């Protein structure tokens, strides 16, 4: 395996008395899609948020595309143009139209040419199947549409890695599909993706590797066929028994 | 028009000197402009203080937060008239003087400037708290989304937090600015020739207290109505379609 695009080594993180991550390590190669599953409170979201430095771990080392995320003097802008993140609650900027949401950061953070960004943003809106909604405000869009705008907004930064933090958890079952299709398109184009998800079917179909976390550690990880077909750890079996 | 008000005086005894006497018309006109100038400038300055103060309140550097907290405590917990006196008499007494064109020593800082400073700081203290209420209403997750897109704290503040906070706190901001316009009358106490001050001069000369009182009240109603109208226009312009419905 080449040098991994994302490398997480022995990461520890505590919030007060609660040790959320207790020595987590995983590597993701370029173009790989990994899914992190596990019960709530097992630290999977925190792990994802460590990757783009929204959360700073106490110890351990994380590198993304050669950037040392755990360095004391991290340049967050350099990191975040490489790493896109999509949240459970979409978190669009409600005072800007869909197109403006997609364009804002490349124009004002990366200082890219406005016309170029706009062309790219329009193409991305089409890619997430939201042509014609460019002028709509987030409040006028459905949850699934908002989430796809959020994906386009991250993609417009032209990242190397995309982080998806339970992006379908707030959606109703019918709209879940439209968001998953968008992510599938991305994965098939070779985007490196880290997903925290409860969509087991999606993890089975799409992931190159599945990680199961519980109480701050990775209990078990394997390619999906093996992971779902023949889970080894008792805790994994118990969890899968509950969700499948 | 002057004819009409002269007539009105002889027929009814209602003496609106400002509408037929050129001298009174002139000084009251200037007074009206002075009130407008004081209102507009103090509104603008207090808004700047509010925005900057609310940003400093969230700073990581603790002494800066203490300074803001001290400023708010001082200006919110003391009467604005006392503040006005404090600036004019206490600070005014220790600021240097310069000779004017006829050689008289006049203070470098005019009573108008002191009034402007006092009013802006007074209303600014409230504006800081008003903006803070708006800023705290912006979900942490929205700020995180901005940070994930590479925005710095200042960048996220400008592009996301402030525009959203503004929309939340406009109604209370509106209240405070209305109060500020009315509080400009306190500049009377340090001899700024604004509307109340000049009205007082006029009714001392012409003994037309009732008439001038009515003129004053109507003009303040007009000024505040104009301000409220502008603020409502602004509120509508900032409307976020589909949000909160």
Image: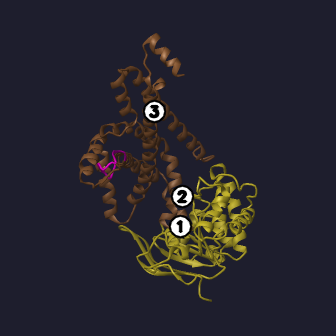
- Residue B104 part of the magenta segment: yes
Helix, strand or loop at mark 1:
loop
Of badges 3 and 2, the one in the foreground is: 3
**Colour displayed for chain A in the image of the structure:** yellow
**Residue B29 spot, x, y in % from top left:** 46, 34
Label disc, if present, on residue B160 of the rendered structure = 2
B88 lies above or below A171? above
Q: Which chain carries label 2?
A: B
Secondary structure type for disc 2: helix
Kindly tell me whether residue B24 is visible in this rendering. Answer: yes
Considering every residue shown, the one lying at the far bottom of the view is A2
Camera-side mark, 1 or 3:
3
Task: Give the letter of the chain under mark 3.
Answer: B
Chain drawn in brown:
B
Nearer-the-camera pick, B26 or A148? B26
Q: Do labels 2 and 1 share a chain?
A: yes
Q: How far separated are the C-alphas under marks 2 and 1?
A: 10 Å
């Amino acid at each position: 395996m080449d040098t991994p695009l994302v490398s997480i080594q022995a990461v520890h993180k505590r919030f007060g008395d609660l040790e959320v991550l207790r020595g987590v390590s995983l590597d993701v190669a370029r173009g790989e899609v990994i899914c992190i599953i596990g019960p709530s409170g097992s630290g999977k979201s925190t792990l994802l948020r460590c990757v783009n430095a929204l959360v700073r771990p106490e110890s351990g080392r994380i590198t993304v595309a050669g950037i040392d995320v755990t360095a004391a003097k991290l340049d967050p802008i350099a990191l975040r143009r490489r790493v896109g993140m999509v949240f459970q609650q979409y978190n669009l900027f409600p005072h800007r139209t869909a197109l403006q949401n997609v364009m804002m950061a490349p124009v004002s953070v990366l200082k890219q040419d406005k016309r170029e960004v706009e062309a790219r943003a329009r193409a991305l809106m089409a890619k997430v199947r939201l042509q014609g909604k460019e002028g709509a405000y987030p409040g006028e869009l459905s949850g699934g549409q908002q989430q796809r705008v959020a994906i386009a907004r991250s993609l417009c930064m032209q990242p190397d890695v995309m982080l998806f933090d339970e992006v379908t958890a707030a959606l109703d079952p019918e709209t879940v599909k439209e968001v998953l299709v968008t992510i599938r398109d991305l994965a098939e184009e070779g985007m490196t993706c880290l997903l925290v998800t409860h969509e087991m079917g999606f993890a089975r179909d799409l992931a190159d590797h599945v990680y199961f976390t519980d109480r701050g550690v990775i209990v078990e990880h394997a390619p999906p066929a093996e992971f779902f077909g023949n889970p080894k750890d008792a805790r994994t079996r118990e969890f899968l028994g509950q969700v499948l | 028009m002057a004819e009409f008000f002269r007539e009105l005086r002889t027929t009814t005894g209602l003496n609106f000197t400002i509408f037929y006497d050129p001298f009174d018309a002139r000084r009251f006109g200037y007074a009206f402009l002075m009130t407008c100038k004081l209102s507009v400038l103090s509104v603008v300055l207090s808004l700047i203080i509010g925005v900057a103060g609310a940003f400093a309140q969230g700073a990581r550097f603790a002494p800066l937060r203490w300074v803001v907290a001290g400023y708010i405590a001082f200006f919110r917990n003391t009467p604005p008239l006392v503040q006005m006196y404090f600036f004019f008499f206490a600070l005014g007494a220790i600021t240097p003087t310069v000779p004017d064109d006829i050689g008289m020593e006049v203070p470098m800082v005019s009573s108008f400037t002191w009034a402007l400073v006092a009013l802006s700081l007074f209303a600014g203290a409230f504006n800081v708290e008003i903006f803070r209420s708006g800023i705290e209403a912006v979900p942490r997750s929205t700020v995180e989304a901005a940070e994930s897109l590479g925005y710095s704290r200042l960048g996220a503040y400008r592009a996301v937090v402030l525009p959203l906070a503004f929309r939340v706190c406009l109604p209370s901001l509106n209240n405070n600015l209305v109060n500020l316009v009315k509080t400009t009358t306190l500049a009377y106490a340090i001899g700024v020739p604004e509307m109340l001050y000049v009205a007082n001069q006029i009714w001392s000369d012409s003994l037309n207290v009732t008439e001038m009182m009515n003129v004053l009240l109507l003009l303040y109603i007009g000024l505040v109505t104009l301000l409220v109208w502008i603020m409502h226009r602004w509120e509508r312009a900032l409307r976020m379609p589909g949000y909160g419905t």
